[in-house]
Image (cartoon, rainbow, N blue to C red):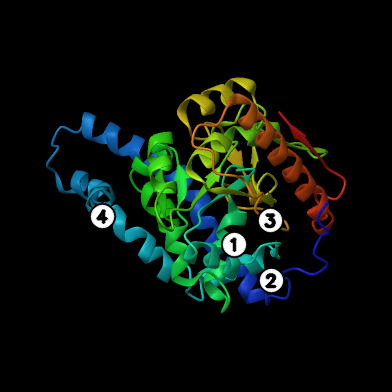
Amino acid sequence: MVPALTEPTRSYIDGTPTQRRLGFVAASIFSATYVIAPVYLLVTGVTLVRAKRPLAKEVWLLTLPLIASALIPAKILPKFGRWLLQTKFMACVPYYFEYEEFHEITDQEVLKLHDEGKRVIGCMHPHGVFPFVSVCAVTSTLQANDGFGDGILDLPTAVANVIRTMPILKDVVGVFGCIDASGSYLKSRLQRRKGSVVLYVGGMVELFYASPKKETVFLKKRKGFVKLALRTGADLVPVYLFGNTTSLEALKWPILAKISRKTGVSFTLFWGRWFLPLPKKVKLTYARGRPLGLPHIENPTDADVEKYHALYVQKLVELFDRYKKFNPDYADKQLAVE
């Protein structure tokens, strides 16, 4: 087993009260949008259907955000996000969560792999209602002198189509750089130079199975990402996001889990601070393991996939166990693989 780092690669535990307050406001924008966007679309749709004068000024004023969202080109959002996430306002987000990160492979080492023509799949676990750990990680690397810099544009996140197409929500999430999560698109991308990708392997459904004593990742039947990596010659980098399932609470009825799995988006009620869709003040920790060192097998057999899937599961559990001690909410938790 790889020994755990004894000190965080980057730490944000010494923020001022002002930084923490601003960080809370900035972080709240993302989770609040998950509620505001669908409610706004519902209200706008009902208003347009029931309006006796659809061309009335008040009706069209209501639709202005929808029109603006439709006109914003998706390709400009990652570059805008690169600027936005470097602002002093967004730089406060990690301080609110007293965020820390541990890199067994550094940002600079990942960039070196890109320069050498290699690609990686950053495998993130778990998703939670909203992945605030990832927000902190992106903000942190863009603020750091030894971070990804412009290289962040070569590390987009694969997301469900509903996220990429829902007005307003697509624009807020799009600042992180989002791409199609379909297997055919990912295969094509991973065969390019600098074609790496970030993937939430278990998806949003994992949030329905977290508890105070146990974390759950959905991996037993998720083997496509391993086969994809073997076929394209990409490597797998396990990443655990401590705090994604504690920053917001959610209703965990089984029927909601089934609907969420079908739609590709969290279909549930959620809340945080003051019982509003605002993140609780919990510690967030990011742990990135070493690449597994997968071979390039253009036509992997089922046995090949099983072998390297088992290796991946082993390395993820080991990563969880190495770094859970650095987050008090996880110190006594066990990681279950379903």
Spatial CA span between label 2 and label 1 = 10 Å
The mark tally for this picture is: 4
Which residue lies under the disc numbered 4? 73
Q: Is residue 262 something one can see in this rendering?
A: yes
Which residue lies under the disc numbered 2? 12
**Cβ atoms under marks 2 and 1 closer than 8 Å:** yes
Question: Which quadrant of the figure has residue 333?
Answer: top right
Three-letter amino acid code at the position of disc 4: Pro
Residue 171 at x, y percent in the picture: 36, 52
Q: Earlier in the sequence, mark 2 or mark 1?
A: 2
**Cβ atoms under marks 2 and 3 closer than 8 Å:** no
Spatial CA span between label 1 and label 3 = 20 Å
Residue 196 at x, y percent in the picture: 48, 53
Residue 294 at x, y percent in the picture: 62, 45
129 with respect to 215 (left or right):
left
Q: Secondary structure at mark 1?
A: helix
Above/below status of 121 relative to 10: above
Q: Secondary structure at mark 3?
A: loop
Above/below status of 168 relative to 259: below
Which residue lies under the disc numbered 3? 290
Three-letter amino acid code at the position of disc 1: Cys
